[in-house]
Image: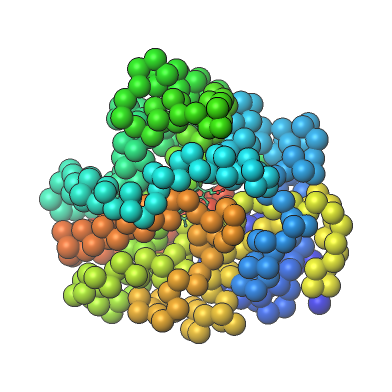
Amino acid sequence: MSTMEPQVDFTSPAFKKNPYKILANMRQQNPVAKISLPGDRAGWLVTRYEDVEALIRDPRLSIDIRDVYPPEVIKAVFPFGEVSEALLHSMVFTNDPKMHSRLRNLVSGSFTPRYIETWQDRIQNIIDEVIDQLPEHGEIDFIREVAFPLPMIVMSELLGIPSEDRDKFRDWSNSYVDSLGNPAAAQAIMSDMADFQQYLFQLVETKRTNPSDDLLSKMVHTEVDGDHLSRQELIGMTLLLVMAGNETTASLIGSAMLTLFQNPDQMELLKRNPALLKPAIEEFIRYRGPLLNLNDRWAVEDFEYKGQQIKKGEAIYLCVTSANRDEERFQNGGSFNAQRPDLQRHVGFGLGMHYCLGAPLARLEGFIGLRTILQRLPGIRLAVPVEELTWRPSIITFALEKLPVRY
Ligand code: HEM
């Protein structure tokens, strides 16, 4: 078995166009593969379901880069000053169970399936309003006009981000996500990120002096074990919720529509039986989910795994896009089947301590959003050949740049 794959740029739109064949070959021939990353870094790409599942919980890997690198190295990977610092202090970047549950418990009540159900009518109204604003018929970019506004409005209302700021918030958070693992892209958005930071400071101050009935105001004024969340923790939490919640859900809805365009029999089935859509959200995530890889994991020691020598400090990418199509786990993993018997088994929401906090919200937005789109835009179809579609360049996410549709 060779340790070095013929080099593939995993951040490139060309790879994203059709990663499945390459990933299937890797699962067969080189399931724990050494890869080179932008910025001359080395890392590992893990493509089999069983290895992704095992390594998520392996204590020799950490999600916290501070466990392996000094601040000057961390600055190169997370280069946006206080914005990066704040994110590094959010729940998703800590391994420490006490710190993690302190942060997660503070907001988890707002994301339980039961609480999220109370948002059902509002989510329905929002998607209806989004569709009401479309021209009666014609061609639109579905991602920009439909898939993005729904989660952005929901999350902004939940958190309390003023409606007039939503577009710039979306642009800032998209540029941040696209720059992950790509130092040149990061360099290009330095001044935008400084504006983003200023904006967030101001927002937290406004909630402190002028609280209302929203999650951010609640977080500013809640005490945890006798102390308040620091300004940095509040900003970290806001950033995490917006970044983790918007783009992922927008991609879920956009990629789901692409999947239905390519599987017209399944589109018909779901139009005839909209109730099937609720469980089928899991299949959309398995088949073409919003993430290519989980967040970087870092080796905290040298160790051998499946014959490969992994060195302390190397980045390990657990490829959920690949694991979710692993034929060892999913029969006919390369086909979309809304009625698949083992719907819940995918790793698209992660596993273990960092399992997606927003899964109930993503499921509900996905279900109500897709049901309404299929009902209200019954003639919706792709407006360009599939080969012309392009994908955004991040190493973590798997998101369509645009999805031109006619209806
Ligand atoms: C289809 C949509 C979504 C997908 C596929 C998704 C996927 C994931 C995955 C895979 C993780 C684990 C990351 C890792 O282990 O490296 C995660 C964590 C997280 N997600 Fe989601 N997510 C989605 C929507 C949302 C939404 C709507 C929210 C809104 C609140 C959200 C908030 C979070 C948070 C806060 C974490 C960190 C949890 C922790 O560290 O304890 N996600 N998500």
Which residue is rendered at x = 42% and y = 19% of the image?
208
Residue 403 in picture, x, y percent from top left: 35, 55
Q: Foreground residue, 345 or 71?
A: 345
Quadrant in the picture for the C terminus: bottom left
Instruction: Farthest residue to the top: give it.
Output: 209
Instruction: Farthest residue to the front: give it.
Output: 226
Residue 173 in picture, x, y percent from top left: 48, 37
Which residue is rendered at x = 52% and y = 43% of the image?
104
Residue 365 in picture, x, y percent from top left: 32, 54
Instruction: Farthest residue to the bottom: give it.
Output: 331
| Quadrant assignment, res 14 | bottom right
The total of numbered circles placed on residues is 0
Which residue is rendered at x = 59% and y = 31% of the image?
86
Q: Is residue 381 left or right of residue 229?
A: left
Q: Foreground residue, 275 or 268?
A: 275
Q: Foreground residue, 233 or 17?
A: 233
Q: Is residue 221 above or below residue 339?
A: above
